[in-house]
Image: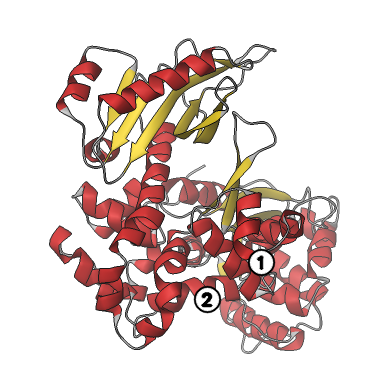
Amino acid sequence: MTLLAKPDRIFDRDVEWAELARFAADERPGATLGVVSGRRRQGKTLLLYELARASGGFYFGATEATSVDSLRRLGEVLGAYAGSPGPVQLPDWSAAIDALLTLGRDRPVTVVIDEFPYLVRAARELPSIIQHALTPGRPERAESRTRLLLCGSALSFMGGLLAGSAPLRGRAGLELPVQPLDYRAAAAFWGFDDPLLAVKVFAIVGGTPAYRREYVQDDAPTGPDDFDAWVVRAVLNPARPLFREARYLLAEDPDLRDAALYHSVLAAVAEGNASRGGIAGYIGRKATDLQHPLTVLEDAGLLLREPDPLRSGRSNYRITEPLITFYQAVMRPAWTALEQRRGADVWRRSQRRYASAVLGPRFEEIVRQWAVRFADLGAFGGIVAEACAATVTDPSTRTSHELDLVALGEPPLGDGPRPLLAIGEVKWGRRLGQADLERLRRVRELLLRRPGFDATGTRLLLASAEGFTDDLARAASARQDVILVDRDRLYAG
């Protein structure tokens, strides 16, 4: 099987392109189905459009329209693709899907339906129609090699498309999420070689490709000294699309109907309230009332619930989209002033808030991502399967110790304890020293007595954007159980 070469205009996305190209090039008889999902602005449309173009396939971008109007548009695009003298007449969606299967009668043909949720909103029977069309043994399916790709940005809808008793469950041969770029890929995409600048920008816009080009008019900080001015002119400027983007991210998902409630929940998390009880206290609701909004935000891909591995039944919530954190922490409280174009004043007053509520938590997440994806194999004495924040309680003193990083190895095959590879302290704006190392050592002693985890080889990680004191550097050089991570190490390699 010869796979299509990835076009030069697609940055990164090697894994996603390889999966799509393999799906499109499948020579086996029988039509097949793939589902591509991901939040808006991640480059899904570009990937699929280029795939269809490179393979000589068919692409249809759905819009918000009535069912009849969408069928008419699809018929026009089909007619143009097939070289017909006029539109293909499609009386209903069953005929439309069969027409798409007919495209693959002689060879494998990629067929892309982008923004599929728009079509289902007007024709709720469409998933069931596709299920029937792809029934094994049905002649129209067996005689076709159409590679049908359904794509959508409404994560709650796309997540349910193949779940449970949904009509298409068991029909898809490809389920591909398109995630934001990781922090290293984002730095390369923006053209940054200064780790400090890369972290600062990533903490605001994350790894969403569209925020680099269209949303800031191709404007990037020219260097560390230009960062503050860039924030004012590109992010806090009402004339730039990025200014209202965080609001639109919530408005675009059809399941997020109570915008005020969801904004309040996100504001609570942005303020550092990571538990359900903390969120409830912040917004003045009972914790039991938050099950639905928290679930909806999770399904929409805007909130992530991470179980605390050291406290059974406890979880922490964090916002997945950096721009929403920045909006809730910096922009929303000063919205009126920003609309009056006083962005420079707002940014000047927001430095401490930006550092504590935006930059610090995002730097912690970058370090955890480094531990899982980029750390050299010998750093932790094993493969890190999971890295998260956690809380350790000391029963003897009834005190709690917050850990910015807990790195866990793979769960054992039997009933043995799970390897606890490292615990860590992560700080953005403070140099770490010997006292921080000593605190981690004391916490490790508590974990040695904790059942369920093997802490005999646990290493002590200290990460700081400001570096380390000389005494800590000397101590670390003499010990194999200490890992020091500065900003350069995060981006090295």
Mark 2 vs mark 1: give the one in front. 2
Is residue 455 in sight in this rendering?
Answer: yes
Q: Which residue is mark 2?
A: 248
Please, is residue 149 above or below residue 335 in the view? Answer: above
What's the amino acid at mark 2?
A: Tyr
Q: Label 1: how many residues lie within 10 Å, few (<14), some (14-19) or many (20+)? A: many
Q: Earlier in the sequence, mark 2 or mark 1?
A: 1
Instruction: Report which quarter residue 70 is drawn in.
Output: bottom right
Q: Position of residue 265 (x, y in %)?
A: 60, 63
Nearer to me, 413 or 248: 248
Please, is residue 439 above or below residue 107 in the view? Answer: above
Q: Position of residue 245 (x, y in %)?
A: 46, 74
Instruction: Report which quarter residue 159 is drawn in.
Output: bottom right
Q: Which residue is mark 1?
A: 103
How far apart marks 2 and 1 lie (CA) works out to: 37 Å
Nearer to me, 181 or 240: 240
Is residue 150 in sight in this rendering?
Answer: no
Instruction: Report which quarter residue 90 is drawn in.
Output: bottom right
Residue at 22% x, 39% y: name it.
488
Total labels: the figure holds 2
| Dot 2: element | helix
Residue at 31% x, 59% y: name it.
352
| Dot 1: element | loop
